[in-house]
Image (cartoon, rainbow, N blue to C red):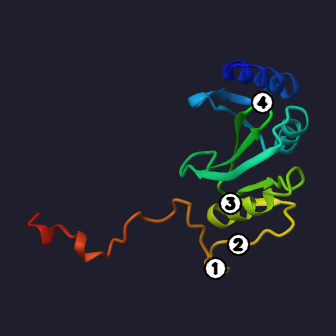
Amino acid sequence: MEETTLNNDIHVKLTERFGERVTAVSEPYGLLTFVTYKDVVINVLSYLKEELKFNFLTDITAVHYPGKDHGIAVVYHLHNMVEKVRIRVKVFISEQNPTIPTATTVWKGANWMERETYDLFGVKFEGHPDLRRILNMDDLGVHPMLKQYPLEDPNRVDKKDEFFGR
C-alpha cells in the first residue's frame, strides 16, 4: 500500500475515534504528524499501539518554544514495523506547568526516554516510576535545552568590537 494511502487511513481512523482531539494533521516529508492533548494522549498512544499496530516507540523528546502560549511540545515518534510506516504525535504543554502523563503505562521502554526529556527540558511525566536526572548532575538546577539563557557569554573578550577595529 502506498505511503499517502496509509497515512490517510490512519488519519481517518484517528478522527473517527478521537474527533477534534486530533488536530493539525500534516505530512512533512511523508511523515504523518498530528497534535493531540495531554488529557487524551495516553488513550491516543494506546489506540495507536493496540489497534493500529504502532508497536515500537522510537523516541520521546521535546521542543521549547519560548514566549509562546504552548511553551513546550512533547513529541512521540512511533513505528508500525508491519506496514513500515512511522508517525509523529505532538502534545503542547505550558512552560509554567510542564506536566504530562507517563507513557510507561503503554511502553516500558518509555522510562529512560522520559527521564532524558525531564532532564533536558524539565517535562514532568506524571506517574513515572523513577523520574530523576539521567544525563546531568542531580544538583544542576537548570534544564539545558530550555532556551532561558543567552546563547553567548557576554563577558567573552574575544568577541569585543574594539579588538577588531570596529
State yes or no: discs 1 and 4 in contact (Cβ < 8 Å): no
Helix or strand or loop: what does disc 2 sit on?
A: loop
- Is 113 situated left or right of 104 in this image? left
State yes or no: discs 2 and 1 in contact (Cβ < 8 Å): yes
Report the Cα–Cα distance between label 4 and label 2: 35 Å
Q: Which mark is residue 133?
A: 2
Q: Report the mark closest to the observer, 4 or 2.
A: 4
Residue in the image at 51% along x and 59% along y = 147
Report the Cα–Cα distance between label 2 and label 3: 9 Å
Q: Which mark is residue 83?
A: 4
Residue in the image at 85% along x and 56% along y = 104
Q: Position of residue 30 (x, y in %)?
A: 61, 28
Mark closest to the chain's N terminus, 2 or 3: 3
Residue in the image at 84% along x and 40% along y = 40
Q: Position of residue 12 (x, y in %)?
A: 79, 20
Residue in the image at 86% along x and 40% along y = 49
Mark closest to the chain's N terminus, 4 or 2: 4
Q: How many neighbours does mark 4 have within 10 angstroms: few (below 14), some (14-19), or many (20 or more)?
A: some
Mark closest to the chain's N terminus, 3 or 4: 4
Q: How many neighbours does mark 3 have within 10 angstroms: few (below 14), some (14-19), or many (20 or more)?
A: many
Residue assigned mark 1? 137
Helix or strand or loop: what does disc 4 sit on?
A: loop
Looking at the image, is 9 positioned above or below residue 92? Answer: above
State yes or no: discs 3 and 4 in contact (Cβ < 8 Å): no
Q: Which mark is residue 117?
A: 3
- Type of the residue with mark 1: Met
Which corner quadrant of the image does residue 3 belong to? top right
Report the Cα–Cα distance between label 3 and label 4: 28 Å
Helix or strand or loop: what does disc 3 sit on?
A: helix
